[in-house]
Image: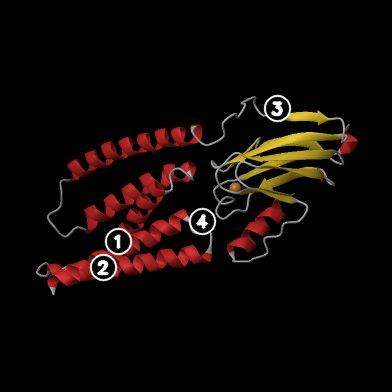
């Protein structure tokens, strides 16, 4: 029986870690579903840890260890593996998720381990040295994935010269680029109340992105509704969805001055920081 139980225990523990990793990747707990997935992951992990302790027999492990440090350890491993898995898609998030998972799993193993305790000095050296290496590797990976993100001919001109006058339409053209680093370029730009704008929205990433313009509180509301599972993914005249490698044009005029927001509501993008803002000056101030 021992072997069979050990196998079940292994399956259960890894399934648990997989669930937590999945929840980290898919929206980073921004949706109810991913929170449930993560909770299930913790439960699976605990069942696995319990079975494992039983099958190894002999040494008794206290429930406190299984519960307290099992939870910590499953979350740590889930963050670590989930962060690694989606590094190319969301480097800005993985850069902290991966080291966080490393430290969490380390702490849980150190304090939860029933076997003779390792020397504190050795563990601290390992944590600092290993942690520093890991953080350095993550930062390097962010640089790599941001630089190699698929946007062939981005021109870095500080974002100030993206504005080109379109004489035919009498509208000012603003080019806004979106890519898989989940940023708008430029992320901040300026306009004037009542000014006719022609927004050229380019998706140079490999996944779909969208540009939704609205007052900042409207955008936050929209994000909240989507987290609550609303299907009301309204695509009206203030939004444009662009497939990878495509571009779209949106005619737009700001009717009131102030700070307006831009956002992408593809799952997880808003939460990962795919937002920007537009400062709209009052036309009377000119
Ligand atoms: Cu997006």
Q: Name the residue at 54% across, 41% down.
A: 181
What separation in Å lies between label 4 and label 2 (alpha carbons)? 26 Å
- Distance from the alpha carbon under mark 1 to that under mark 3: 49 Å
Helix, strand or loop at mark 4:
loop
Q: Residue at x 46, y 36 (%)?
A: 145
Dot placed on the residue nearer the N-terminal end, 1 or 3: 1
Q: Earlier in the sequence, mark 4 or mark 1?
A: 1
- The mark nearer the N terminus, 1 or 2, is 1
Reply above or below: 259 against 111.
above
Taking the view exactly as shown, the residue that stands out farthest to the left is 58
Residue beneath disc 2: 48
Report, in whole angstroms, how far the alpha carbon at label 3 lies from the one at label 2: 56 Å
Residue denoted by label 4: 27
* Numbered disc in front, either 1 or 3: 1
Please name whichever residue, 96 or 202, is drawn nearer the observer in this view of the structure: 202
User: What numbered label is drawn on residue 262?
Assistant: none
Instruction: Classify 10 Å Cα crowding around label 2: few (below 14), some (14-19), many (20 and above).
Output: many
Count the marks.
4
Q: Residue at x 48, y 45 (%)?
A: 89
Q: Quadrant of residue 56?
A: bottom left
Residue 221, image x, y percentages = 67, 59
Within 10 angstroms of label 1, few (less than 14), some, or many (20 or more) residues? some
Mark 3 lies on residue: 160
Whether residues under marks 1 and 3 lie with C-beta atoms below 8 angstroms apart, the answer is no
Which of the two labelled residues, at mark 3 and mark 4, occupies the earlier sequence position? 4
């Amino acid at each position: 029986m021992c072997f069979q139980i050990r196998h079940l225990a292994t399956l259960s523990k890894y399934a648990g870690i997989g669930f937590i990793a999945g929840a980290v990747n898919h929206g980073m707990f921004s949706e109810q579903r991913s929170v449930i997935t993560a909770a299930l992951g913790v439960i699976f992990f605990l069942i696995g840890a319990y079975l494992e302790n039983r099958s190894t027999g002999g040494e008794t492990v206290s429930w406190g260890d299984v519960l307290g440090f099992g939870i910590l350890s499953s979350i740590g491993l889930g963050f670590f593996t989930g962060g690694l898995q989606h590094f190319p898609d969301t480097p800005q998030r993985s850069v902290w998720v991966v080291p966080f998972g490393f430290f969490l799993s380390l702490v849980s193993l150190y304090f939860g381990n029933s076997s003779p305790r390792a020397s504190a000095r050795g563990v601290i050296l390992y944590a600092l040295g290993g942690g520093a290496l890991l953080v350095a590797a993550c930062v390097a990976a962010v640089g790599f994935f941001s630089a190699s993100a698929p946007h062939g001919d981005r021109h870095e001109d500080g974002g100030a010269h993206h504005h080109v006058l379109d004489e035919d339409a009498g509208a000012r053209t603003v080019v806004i680029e979106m890519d898989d680093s989940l940023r708008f370029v430029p992320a901040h730009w300026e306009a004037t109340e009542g000014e006719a704008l022609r927004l050229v929205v380019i998706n140079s990433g490999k996944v779909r992105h969208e540009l939704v313009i609205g007052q900042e509180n409207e955008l936050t509301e929209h994000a909240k509704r989507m987290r609550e599972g609303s299907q009301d993914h309204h695509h009206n005249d203030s939004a444009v969805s662009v497939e990878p490698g495509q571009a779209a044009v949106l005619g737009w005029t700001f009717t009131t001055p102030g700070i307006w927001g831009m956002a992408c509501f593809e799952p997880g993008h808003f939460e990962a920081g795919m937002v920007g803002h537009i400062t709209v000056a009052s036309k009377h101030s000119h």
